[in-house]
Amino acid sequence: MLGLMQDQPLAISSLIEFAARHHHDGQIVSRRVEGDIHRYTYREAAARSRQVAAALDRLGLAFSERVATLAWNGYRHFELYFGIAGSGRVVHTLNPRLAPEQLVWIANHAEDRVIAFDLSFLLLIKAVWRQCPTVKHWIALCEPGALPSDSGIDGLQSYEAWIAGQSDTYAWPVFDEKSAAILCYTSGTTGNPKGALYSHRSTLLHAWAVALPDAISLSARDSILPVVPMFHVNAWGIPFAAAMTGARLVFPGAALDGKSVYELLESERVTMAAGVPTVWLMLLNHVKQNGLKFTHMRRTLIGGSACPPAMIKSFRDDYDVTVLHGWGMTEMSPVGTVCNLKLAQLALEPDAQLAILAKQGRALFGVEMRIVGPDGRELPWDGQASGDLHVRGPWIVSGYFRGEGGDPLVDGWFPTGDVASIDADGFLQITDRSKDVIKSGGEWISSIDIENVAVAHPAVAMAACIALPHPKWGERPLLVVVKKPGAEVSRDDLLHFYTGKVAQWQVPDDVVFVETIPLGATGKMQKNKLREQFKGHRLPG
Ligand code: ADP
């Protein structure tokens, strides 16, 4: 016997319609690439999303055809998300931090029909547009007056001219909730990038789970600033979760330096922000150097790479801001876990709480996890055993776009490529990416643990720990360090700093100081580049 409940497909268009109806005057604030601050409401965003949908119909785009965006976080990008997906096409977010040849490869693989881009990427588009034969329409996210007349790009038009005159009473089509909605390619550090193809259903379920109290607890009383880009993994689903809850949205545009982000946090009374540790480092430095405080911000979601405990502690003890450490990946839409304490843990001492908050947190409802050993057997959740982390759930990939890379699943589970432990309370702790873990004399050293100690040193801005080949031990750790401006610390001081913090055999064999550590397109340290750079480095002893 079936239940007697209405069979309504979950649709991305319903999010913006809900926001327009229930939070019609809810604000969306954007720092535009033009430099000024733009403000409007969910009602206006919905109307313009409908105009985007109508404009796409006008272009004659078929169901499921790909419409790409190459843009910062801003209101036009937000409208495109809903207009494209809501009308049954697929939003393909292109990451402008990728090399031009990678962008071309991805646009061709996705067979994009339209690319909508911020004018700040005009030079990039000029360099690549001829190599994207499937793209028939180029749309610059600007007023007609700002459109360069001599761009040489065939079919270029301004976004505002493109949607002007389109009806804003568009009726959203109804279709299968499993239809493709959004396409996002993995960064492809090994092999070609692979496309994770999210559906309407997966996107809504993910947004629902992300908004829950034990995830980021988003509500109509929040003002949220996603520094995490909409051009990669949908800014962790925040635009959708915000529309679902009516939270005020504050988009930072291209200005991601500490000063600009801080100004917006204050002027827009932001209660919650989300970003990767490298961006938050810039913010914290700015706030510290200028003796500032956060007037409104009470919590921040940090993930994408391990958030050092020193950062979590500083946010808590110096600024009264709770860090929600999250973990996930492109293949998981992207959020898998978020760290929030349980009731019994509220009675613990601050240091004991910090030890828990430094973990990557508990699975959202909908995400199943398991850790397995080398023999494929499941390992216990005791906080000690660490193994390959597998996940499954309704917003986790079952395969990649156009079958790239074959079937990724093992017995129905997706192997994340991360090594982790899980404690009896279900808190996940990522030891490492399996390719970054350091295998020394049959034991594993977590590069994350070693880095966390280094960045707790007051003179260290950033640290990466990589494996170097070693004749006796197989591999040994090398620590690569960027010092804070004007700060001094010697190799020996830093190695001494490890005493009592990790086992003696885990202390790095050597330290090298560098000006910068290369970051990838999603703000992660590129350890493969460091391994290449230091492959000839001779470890002492
Ligand atoms: P994204 O594209 O969202 O940056 P990727 O798929 O490129 O994600 O990378 C996901 C990987 O990033 C994870 O498999 C994990 O290795 C790493 N990662 C993400 N969040 C964390 C975290 N909080 N702690 C440690 N590693 C993390």
Image (cartoon, helix red, strand yellow):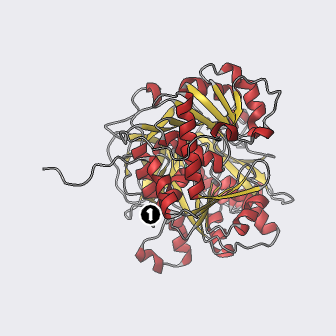
- What x and y, as percent, mark residue 215? 47, 62
Q: How many marks?
A: 1
Q: Is residue 454 visible?
A: yes
Q: Nearer the viewer, residue 537 or 124?
A: 124
| Residue visible at 59% across and 36% down in the picture | 187
Q: Amino acid at mark 1?
A: Leu
Q: Is mark 1 within 8 Å of ligand 1?
A: no
Q: Tell me, yes or no, if residue 233 can be seen here.
A: no
Residue for badge 1: 212
Find residue 184 and report its image quarter.
Answer: top right
Q: Nearer the viewer, residue 266 or 8?
A: 8
Q: State which quarter of the image contains the C terminus.
A: top right
In the image: residue 98, left or right of residue 82: right
User: In the rendered view, does 237 fall on the left or right side of 535?
Assistant: left
**Vertically, is 236 above or below 453?**
above
Residue 66: horizontal and vertical position, in percent? 53, 31
Q: Nearer the viewer, residue 166 or 27?
A: 166
Residue placed most toward the observer, 290 or 422? 290
Circle 1 packing at 10 Å, graded few (<14), some (14-19), many (20+), is some
Determine whether 165 is above or below 38 in the image: above
Name of the residue lying farthest toward the left: 1
Going by the picture, which residue comes out furthest to the right? 486
Task: Provide residue 339's location: percent of width, then percent of height.
Answer: 49, 63
Going by the image, does 251 lie left or right of 390? right
Place residue 251 in its image quadrant: bottom right
**Residue 511 as seen in the image, left or right of residue 426:** right
SS at mark 1? Answer: loop
Residue 313: x and y in percent read 63, 69
